[in-house]
Amino acid sequence: MDKRTVLVRTAWIVGLVITCMVLPSAVLAAQAAQGQTDFPEQDMRPGEQSSEANWFVPYVAEGLFSCDIPAEWSLEESLEGPATAVSKVYRIVLSRPMPEEMPIRIALGYFAEGNTEFATMDQFIATHSQPILGSTPEEGKPPVAEIIVSGRTATVFTQHRNEFVPMQGIFDAAVLDDGRVYENREMMARQVPMEERFVLLPAGEGFYVLSYDAPTSVFQQFLGTFERVMSTVNAMR
C-alpha cells in the first residue's frame, strides 16, 4: 500500500467520524426549531416517569407528624436540641434549589403551646396574611379558605411577595435591559415574584403549619409535589 493510499483512507475515516459526531447535533437542532424534541418539560430525573409518585418516601417525626416527602429534595430537621427546646417549634424544611432563582421549599412544623414564635394559630394567620406592600387592604389581603387535612379542618391561604436576587454580571439579560445608573454595582438586583401557600391545622395543644414557597414562574409546576405531601400528612398531636 503506497503512501497516497494511506493518506486517502485516513482522510476518509476522519471525515466519517466527524460526520457521526455532527449529524446527531444537527438533527436535534432541526427538531428543536420545529418543536419536535422529546425533552421532558416537567421536573423529571433520569429513569423517572412523568409521575412523581415513584420518588416519594415516608417520613416520621416521632410523636409529632408523618408524611411522604420527595426523596431527592434536601431535608433540614429542627426537631431536637437546645434551640428547639426553647422555641418549642418542631419542623422540617424540604428544599429543591432552582438555578439562578430562589429555592423551592416545603416546610412542615408543629408549634407547641408556649412556643416563642406565635402564641396562637390566629396570630400566625394575621401576621402572614398582611396586605402586599403597595396595595390597599382590600386588594392585598389573600382570601382564606378551609380544607380537610389529616382529618381536621385546616385554614389555607396563598400570599404573594417579591424577592430580589443580585444580578450576576454585566452580561446578565436583566442588567443589559436596565437603563438605570447605580452608585454601586452591588445594589443591582432583579425582582423575583414569589408565592407562598400556608395550610394551618389545629392541634390539641398548639397548631401545625404546612407551607409551600416557590417563584411564581414555577409555582404550578411543583404544586403537585406539595399537594402529595399535604395529602399524606398525619398530625399526631
Image: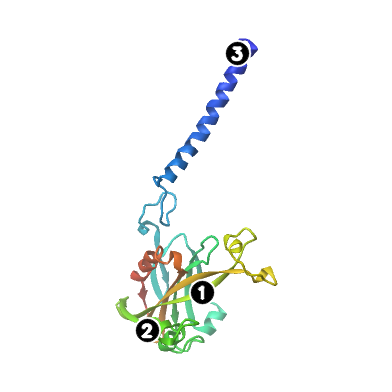
Q: Nearer the viewer, mark 2 or mark 1?
A: 1
The residue carrying mark 3 is 5
Among the two numbered marks 3 and 2 on one chain, the one whose residue lies closer to the N terminus: 3
The residue carrying mark 2 is 203
User: Dot 3, crowdedness within 10 Å: few (<14), some or many (≥20)?
Assistant: few
Q: Is residue 29 above or below residue 10?
A: below
- Regarding mark 3 in the picture, which secondary structure is present there? helix
Q: Distance between the residues labelled 3 and 1?
A: 69 Å
Q: Position of residue 44 (x, y in %)?
A: 42, 54
Q: Where is residue 199 in the image (x, y as percent from the top left)?
A: 38, 77
User: Dot 1, crowdedness within 10 Å: few (<14), some or many (≥20)?
Assistant: some
Q: In which quarter of the view is residue 189 placed? A: bottom right
Total marks placed: 3
The residue carrying mark 1 is 162
Q: Distance between the residues labelled 2 and 1?
A: 32 Å
Mark 3 touches mark 1? (CB < 8 Å) = no
Q: What residue type is labelled 2?
A: Ala
Q: Distance between the residues labelled 3 and 2?
A: 86 Å
- Locate the C terminus by quadrant: bottom left
Residue at image position (62%, 58%) is 171
Nearer to me, 36 or 151: 36
Residue sitting at the far front: 179
Residue sitting at the far top: 1
Among the two numbered marks 3 and 1 on one chain, the one whose residue lies closer to the N terminus: 3
- Regarding mark 1 in the picture, which secondary structure is present there? strand
Residue at image position (45%, 38%) is 27
User: Dot 2, crowdedness within 10 Å: few (<14), some or many (≥20)?
Assistant: some
Q: Which amino acid does label 3 sit on?
A: Thr
Q: Position of residue 17 (x, y in %)?
A: 54, 29
Q: Which amino acid does label 1 sit on?
A: Asn
Residue at image position (53%, 80%) is 84
Mark 2 touches mark 1? (CB < 8 Å) = no
